[in-house]
Amino acid sequence: MSTPAFIPQDTSAIPAVRFYTQFDPYYYSTDNRPLQDLDTNVRLTAGQGGDSARRAVILTELALGEVFRQLFTTSNASGYVTGLGVTSPTGTTLTVQPGSWYQLAALNDSISTQVLKQSLLLAPAALTIPAPTVSGQSINYLVQISASSLTSTNMLTSALPLLDSTNPMLPGLLVNGELLVGIKAGVSAVTGSQVTPTADAGYTALYVVTSTYGSASPSVQLSPAGSPPSMPGLNHAPVIQYPLSGAATPVAVGGIPVASCPQSVATSVAVSTTIQGKQINPFAPIKVSLLVSSTGVSGVPQVQLKYLAMAEGGSTSAAVVTLTAETFAIPTTANTLLTYTMTATVPASAFASFVSTVWKVTADKVTFTVTRNGNVGADTLASPLYIHDIILSQ
């Protein structure tokens, strides 16, 4: 189907409608009414932009959609979230702050072309999270989100801004939609055994909020299940450091210096990152990934993660937190690179908490130590373990 011609925005460019006169063989005051209505409608349409302005907005927003696609490219099929932070409850209320959700979706029901759609939450959303009534129990609540596209039906009642308030068919952004935020309660159970509910049909999991009997504030984390959208967070490959005692040995592999961790002794490497600011996500744990290789082809190395979060005003004698040791299989071909992400992650509570009712980063720096426990029986790799790189991410 061809595109209809644009309606000019300048009413002077529209040919005047010729009315009947008193000299015509018609009763002009009555027979002119249809033509008067036609004249009024055409001028009204042209004065408010009409199809020409509407199509201009569509073309502009499709172009912007391509720009946004580059800005918010992510391998996460659930898209990307900005804003939507959480404030601590007042009584039994948790508040999700305004923000946006960007995701690839079909343009509409009849055009399957994928565009980047933006769903907006313009006002804080208050959610009710009653605490358990039984001592020793907790409840997991799931904060879930859904996108509601603007249509000719709901546009007039939408909270989203319009480009032209006198013409509600011109939305401020073609790809705009309402962001709906909901809460789904799990079942109260003994703390540690409570189960997080799954997201409802049409919704995507965002946060898991745990409310515990007698606790002043809940814990908040990105949903570990249900493929929540990505959020701004740490993605950093810091320089490997060598501790003053028990350090791994730097050796050349392929002409590149790497850390060599032999069997029979415990050796370590360390990395650190500054986290104050917007580069880290206060709702997500820090994951540590190792890029490793070995000349061996059998056996498993045992590695262990330790961390220390430091904040202004804190003590330099603070205790290092040691996480559970773990083993992993090396490739069956010698000198093959492998990326291993440790299951022992640094919880968000180590570097963030509620500050003035807002969940914020509270640490300035986190130092990580990765140790190969080559001196324990669980480590059966007879060859050195080479650590080429350490990547911190969320």
Image: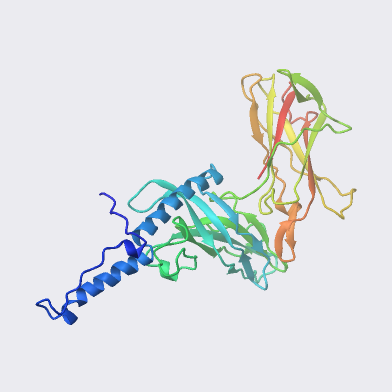
In the rendered view, would you say 387 is above or below 75? above
The quadrant where residue 369 appears: top right
Judge whether residue 73 can be spotted in this image: no
Q: Which residue does the image show at 63% across and 67% down from the upper left?
A: 94
The outermost residue toward the left is: 25
Judge whether residue 221 can be spotted in this image: yes
| 257 on left or right of 330 | right
Q: Which residue does the image show at 17% across and 77% down from the upper left?
A: 21
Residue 392, image x, y percentages? 70, 40
In the rendered view, would you say 243 is above or below 274? above
Residue 46, image x, y percentages? 34, 64
| 170 on left or right of 144 | left
Q: Quadrant of the C terminus?
A: top right
Query: Between 133 and 262, which is closer to the camera in this rendering?
Result: 262
Query: Between 220 and 321, which is closer to the camera in this rendering?
Result: 220
| 31 on left or right of 70 | left
Residue 30, image x, y percentages? 17, 81
Residue 245, image x, y percentages? 89, 32
In the rendered view, would you say 352 is above or below 386? below
The outermost residue toward the front is: 23
Query: Between 150 and 254, which is closer to the camera in this rendering?
Result: 150
In the rendered view, would you say 111 is above or below 19? above
The quadrant where residue 25 appears: bottom left
Type of colouring: rainbow
Q: Which residue does the image show at 47% across and 60% down from the upper left?
A: 172
Total labels: the figure holds 0
Query: Between 325 and 285, which is closer to the camera in this rendering?
Result: 285
